[in-house]
Image: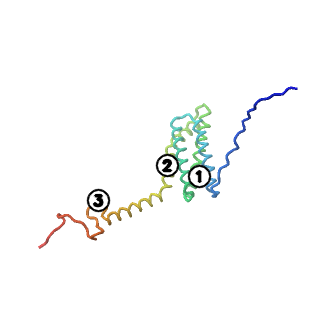
Amino acid sequence: MNAVCGTVEVTVPDPPKKEESTGNPELDKMIKDGNLAISEMKRLNTSIKDEKISADIDRLEDLSAKIFAQVKSDPSKLPQIRKFMDYYLPTTLKLLNAYDRMGAQGVSGENIDATMQRVESMMGTIVTAFEKQLDMLFGSEAMDISADITVLENMMKREGLSEDTGELHAESGTATASQDDIKLEL
């Protein structure tokens, strides 16, 4: 009778992580689609060797992640990125995939060269569009902050706490003036 004693080490892969639900199906879809898009950008970035295009893809990844983070933190902004999610992002990925496929052919031809050149020239415009999309998500917040600043400035003037000349003093209810402002008419 032979017996073998010892330790057997078995590696069991972790079960795939299930995305936690936010309770909002549309937001959950945006998060899932956004993660897939960023993963595809990373894959394309690894595959595409052109340094300029690669830098643009890096920027698009960063901007996309920031856009998705903003909407995730404030789901009321979801309608603001519908066109981005439905058209701009998938079309950008389609262009980058075509660029990658054509570049992988290893040959130069009129159609390949012209198409790749058009994608290259379009990348700056796409990056700018993604930047503007992110900026637009802060529009209402910027307006709220501007209103808060205006109210704060007015309160400080009224209370005599600002350095502006000619402000109202709450205690006296009168405006301050220097001697140069006083004129006598005879």
Element carrying mark 2: helix
Q: Earlier in the sequence, mark 1 or mark 3?
A: 1
Check the image and report above or below for 157 versus 84.
below
Of residue 67 and residue 22, the one placed in the foreground of this image is: 22
> Is disc 2 surrounded by few (<14), some (14 to 19) or many (20+) residues within 10 Å?
some
Mark nearest the camera among 3 and 2 is 3
Check the image and report above or below for 30 versus 104.
below
Element carrying mark 1: helix
Question: How far is disc 2 from disc 1 in space, using C-alphas?
Answer: 14 Å
Left or right of 149 in this view: 138: right
Residue at point 52% right, 47% down?
63
> Is disc 1 surrounded by few (<14), some (14 to 19) or many (20+) residues within 10 Å?
some
Of residue 6 and residue 21, the one placed in the foreground of this image is: 6
Quadrant of the drawing holding the C terminus: bottom left
Question: How far is disc 3 from disc 2 in space, using C-alphas?
Answer: 37 Å
- Location of mark 1 (residue): 85
Outermost residue to the left = 186
- Location of mark 2 (residue): 131
Which disc is residue 163 wearing? Answer: 3
Residue flagged by tag 3: what amino acid is it? Answer: Glu
Image colouring:
rainbow
Residue flagged by tag 2: what amino acid is it? Answer: Glu
Mark nearest the camera among 1 and 3 is 3
Q: Position of residue 137 (x, y in %)?
A: 50, 55
Q: Position of residue 112 (x, y in %)?
A: 58, 36
